[in-house]
Image: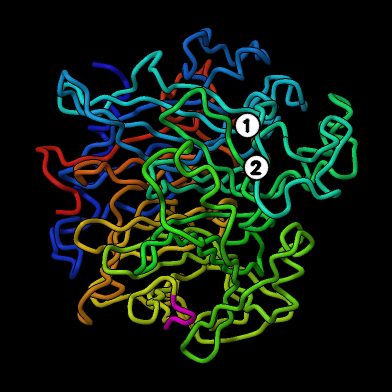
Amino acid sequence: MPILCRRTLLATSAAALAWPAAAQPGVSDILDVSQPVLLDDRIAPGYRRDVLLRWGDRVAFNAPPWNPHLPDAEAAATQFGWDARLAAIIAPPPAADGIPRLVAVFTHTQVDPRLAFPSLLPNPAIEMGMVGASVVNLEFLGGRWVVVDGGFQARRLTATTLCRISGPAAGDARLRTGEDPAGMAARGILAAEGGSATLWRTVLLAEGDAAGQIAAWGDLAPRYREANESNRFGWVVEVDALDPTAVPVKRTALGRFPKADVAVTRAVDGRPVVYMTEARRDGFLYRFVAARAPDGEGLAANGALLDEGALSVARVEGASIRWLRLPATAAALIDARIAAEQAGATPFDSPSGLALAPDGRLFLACRGGERTPARLDSLNPRPINPWGHVVEIVPHNRDHGAEAASGAVLILGGDPAQPGSTARYGAGSRVWLAAPAVLEVDARGRLFIGTAQGSLQRTTGIADGIYVCGTAAAATRGSIALLYAAPRAATIGGLRFSPDHTTLFSVVRTPGAEPGADFTRPTTRWPAFEPALPPRTTAIAIARDRGGMIGG
């Protein structure tokens, strides 16, 4: 039996011993797995965890076999990256053979040389190939989703991929470089974290703060030493995942700031609405409302859709949120953080993941942290918040184009058993969480929460994992159960359901990456546990053992 399958069975057996079979209000079909930090992962009884893709696996058709001990720049640009997060799942048009197919888009945010390279030293030429994004084809065969080797859409986007810059700020002097005097093009997708499928079946990728990568790569190309180069990153990048010939587009109308996540929905009149979180400890929540509705599907049919509209930022006023419109000038868009501060935006506690429910609710994960100065409000109620919390936002009249919304804290992270704890969960919860980072909503309206504590695991003593949270009736709101626990030092990167909600896709990011660990001495060697192999970021699929909807 392959070792990964064997370890899945072992993890399931361990999970069965974690808690007695007690019903969890709102999450009654899930029995908690144990929370302590362990070398292996664990999945709740009745579910299975399948491996889809790992660091170094083939993405492009010409990718060579992975050899972590002899890293190569050309190979890295064709293989799955060292770090990853799931951005979106899209269903392509049905094929004549009737086989269900999906296209998955992953972002590759960063590379830690001490954990990625045997030399433990930076290697910018290889790092440039490891970052960016991967587009991967999936097929449903033999009762589970598998990666299609050499699929039609499969490709890598890296630090050298040509992108187009569009929208109101395109062509501004602050976007021009020696390589592109017109300021209408850029090379590379850098520091991308979250992402979202659009209503017209493209994908939006949220670029974060690329300053560190640009500084480290200064000797590779003259453009990295130009003052304007950093202005060409931090945007929302639109990718047509279904068309491998399409050029990615950086949308300046949505503002430039380091982004953690993006989520797309529509206003009642059909116009697209894009929510974005700022990847800062005191980051803001932004919203863009397009000027018109989509016209068909794909990037070609909607080439200018996200170039016109209104960019706003959230201000918390009591139990309400008011959207403050930002100037549509190039200066305000290129430095959106400054414009948001001047407008009076409310900072959140490290805003991160976003998820939209079918009934119109928006969920926001705040990973937590100490804001300076501490400004308390109804949606950020702790002056020091290392554990994080989740916010529920309901737009007025369930219209995402409305100028106001109501908000409430759904859960407050942390261990409720600790003296003086302000942690808050729903009745019946027998586990607790810290640093909620990524979110997804199932067909029943339950919220799936992926955590990303990082080094905080050493303080909490609990593994990162995927939790399920009730959000509906008062008796079930905020009650949580732990569906999946990641291996030591790993975090959860993205959560997306298959269209039929029978499979939950995710990524287990950077296992073994603790302070003090390195390529030769990781703190786990998950998922293979082979002495010659380092631990590997791994895309996974979670489904019921006997089939059926996870969120049914």
Give the quadrant of residue 431.
bottom left
| Image coordinates for residue 5, horizontal then vertical, percent | 26, 25
Q: Are marks 1 and 2 in contact (CB under 8 Å)?
A: yes
Q: Specify whether 397 is left or right of 32.
A: right
Label 1 sits on residue: 131
Q: Specify whether 94 is left or right of 288.
A: left
| Image coordinates for residue 246, horizontal then vertical, percent | 52, 28
Between 357 and 542, the one lying in front of the other is 357
Q: What kind of secondary structure does the magenta stretch mostly adopt?
A: strand
Disc 1 residue type (three-letter): Val
Using the rendered image of the protein, determine whether residue 511 is visible from the camera's viewpoint: no
Between 17 and 172, the one lying in front of the other is 172
Disc 2 residue type (three-letter): Ala
Q: Is residue 162 above or below residue 476?
A: above
Looking at the rendered image, the quarter that the N terminus falls into is: top left
Q: Residue furthest bottom?
A: 318
Mark 1 crowdedness (10 Å alpha carbons): few <14, some 14-19, many ≥20? many
Between 479 and 198, the one lying in front of the other is 198
Mark 2 crowdedness (10 Å alpha carbons): few <14, some 14-19, many ≥20? many
| Residue bounds of the magenta highlight | 402-406
Residue at 25% of width from left, 34% of height from top?
A: 10
| Image coordinates for residue 291, horizontal then vertical, percent | 51, 62
Label of residue 376 in the image: none
Residue at 48% of width from left, 24% of height from top?
A: 244
Label 2 sits on residue: 191
